[in-house]
């Protein structure tokens, strides 16, 4: 008898788990309440990157004179942008659904909860259905956190999901939150021509990133006219005629036409029936899992944002594949566990930021000996040709063995270039493996080889 595998949530983790398990012979049922592809692909990640891409083209037109062209100017067509994003969303959702059905996965549109360790109840427009399960994956994702002092209205006070795109383009945007999501929105709307104020609760943007990387982004923000309110924690927002006023705990205020809240996320775990099935969650609502993504009830798994690990679509995608392999018993063969410390991540600002592996500050805090090499893109021919030589490549390695431990990239296409360092970190390659590679010339990747020498 085939393994009955029920998946609740069709985001990156659920989608990958479903297709893999079906290929391995499982009887897979996936329950999704909104749209196959999940919020990461269709509400957060993809829409934001689509808007950033549009803003990037606008930024390029503003730099046209530096490329030997006559000055150009571009304006945003909000309806065309909204239609473009809808087209991308619909194309992806259709592709994902077709993929699932081609693998024999049963897709149920509705909500689902655990009724017991081996029972899932699905509620649809047509009624209620009880599903028997040998294994269950919970991958319901997360939602934007809304602070107690704010009441989003979808007009002037916006959550991140209400800004893809907003009802109207802000003339003067106040962004609360200087993590990855916050700084991406700063870059996005600044490229559209809005004035932007960023409220930074600490003393640097991207507080979890390398200070040198954060400083490079701050410098670019200031150069483009972004105002930074550092050391200020937002505690209130008032609607005023034609705009908003954000109040900070130190008495400072920020006035704008709109305010965007980018202050983290909460797991979608409240209505999953965790207690009925005996599944444990932490104080924040994240399901506690082991390195196989198993909960304390071993045939019930959690992946993606719900697992409380790195909130990256790439991580969720890989978790889903690993869960499918574990459900089908393939972990008894040669199997590599996920090492979250080696996950690459990127920030889609301009310039882009990407990193992987051991952070430099953490290495020094641990007293670990490392070798740090850095090469600026100002010395790279391709960067000069393209008229954007901002940023650098930094590589951390073990001075005794030459093994690559981590690295950061600030500059054009950093999200693509970091893949080289991600492979090196994951495979324990040495800096010589990079420096001795015969790379294309001229190319931005040459900076990686130079930093590895």
Image (cartoon, rainbow, N blue to C red):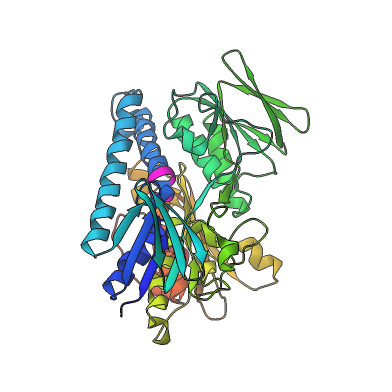
**Which residue is at the far right?**
250
* 295 magenta-colored: no
Magenta region, residue range: 40-44
Toward the viewer: 203 or 444?
203
The residue lying at 44 percent from left, 79 percent from top is 336
Q: Quadrant of residue 330?
A: bottom left
Residue 294: image x %, image y %?
Answer: 52, 72
Q: Nearer the viewer, residue 296 or 346?
A: 296
Predominant secondary structure, magenta span:
helix
Residue 226 occupies which quadrant of the picture?
Answer: top right
The x and y percentages for residue 292 are: 49, 75
Q: Relative to 210, is 406 above or below? A: below
**395 vs 80: above or below:** below
Q: Is residue 210 left or right of residue 96?
A: right
Please indicate whether residue 232 sits to the left or right of residue 450 in the image.
right
| Residue located at (60% from left, 12% from top) | 241
User: What residue appears at the point 56 percent right and 75 percent down from the top-left corner?
Assistant: 398
User: Where the N terminus falls, by quadrant?
Assistant: bottom left
Question: Where 55 sits versus 329, above or below?
Answer: above
Seen from this angle, which residue lies furthest front?
A: 127
Name the residue rendered at 51%, 77% in the picture: 402
Q: Quadrant of the C terminus?
A: bottom left
Percent position of residue 47, x then y:
39, 41
């Amino acid at each position: 008898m085939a393994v009955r595998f029920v998946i609740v949530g069709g985001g990156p983790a659920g989608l990958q788990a479903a297709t893999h398990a079906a290929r391995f012979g499982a009887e897979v049922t996936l329950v999704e309440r909104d749209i196959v592809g999940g919020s990461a692909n269709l509400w957060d990640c993809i829409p934001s990157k689509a808007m950033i891409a549009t803003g990037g083209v606008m930024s390029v037109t503003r730099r046209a004179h530096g490329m030997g062209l006559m000055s150009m100017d571009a304006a945003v067509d909000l309806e065309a942008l909204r239609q473009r994003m809808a087209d991308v969303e619909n194309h992806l959702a259709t592709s994902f659904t077709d993929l699932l059905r081609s693998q024999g996965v049963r897709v149920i549109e509705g909500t689902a909860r655990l009724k017991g360790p081996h029972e899932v109840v699905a509620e649809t427009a047509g009624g209620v259905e009880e599903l028997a399960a040998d294994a269950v994956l919970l991958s319901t994702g997360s939602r934007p956190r809304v602070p107690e002092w704010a009441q989003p209205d979808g007009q002037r006070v916006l959550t991140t999901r209400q800004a893809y795109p907003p009802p109207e383009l802000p003339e003067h945007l106040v962004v609360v939150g200087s993590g990855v999501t916050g700084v991406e929105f700063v870059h996005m709307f600044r490229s559209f021509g809005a004035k932007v104020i960023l409220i930074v609760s600490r003393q640097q943007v991207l507080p979890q990133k390398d200070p040198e990387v954060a400083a490079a982004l701050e410098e670019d923000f200031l150069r483009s006219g972004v105002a930074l309110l550092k050391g200020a924690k937002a505690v209130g927002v008032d609607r005023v005629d034609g705009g908003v006023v954000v109040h900070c705990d130190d008495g400072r205020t920020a006035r704008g036409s709109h305010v965007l809240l980018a202050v983290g996320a909460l797991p979608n775990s409240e209505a999953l029936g965790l207690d009925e099935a005996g599944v444990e969650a932490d104080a924040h609502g994240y399901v506690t899992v082991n390195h196989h993504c198993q909960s304390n009830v071993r045939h019930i798994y959690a992946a993606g944002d719900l697992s409380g690990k790195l909130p990256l679509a790439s991580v969720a995608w890989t978790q889903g594949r690993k869960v499918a392999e574990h459900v089908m018993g393939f972990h008894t063969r040669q199997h590599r566990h996920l090492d979250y410390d080696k996950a690459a991540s990127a920030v889609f600002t301009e310039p882009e930021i990407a990193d992987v592996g051991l952070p430099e500050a953490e290495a020094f805090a641990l007293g670990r000996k490392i070798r740090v090499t850095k090469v600026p893109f100002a010395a790279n021919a391709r960067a000069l040709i393209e008229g954007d030589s901002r940023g650098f490549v930094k590589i951390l390695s073990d001075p005794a063995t030459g093994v690559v431990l981590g690295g950061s990239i600030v500059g054009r296409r950093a999200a693509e270039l970091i893949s080289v360092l991600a492979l090196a970190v994951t495979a324990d390659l040495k800096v010589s493996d990079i420096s001795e590679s015969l790379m294309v010339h001229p190319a931005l990747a040459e900076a990686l080889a130079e930093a590895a020498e």
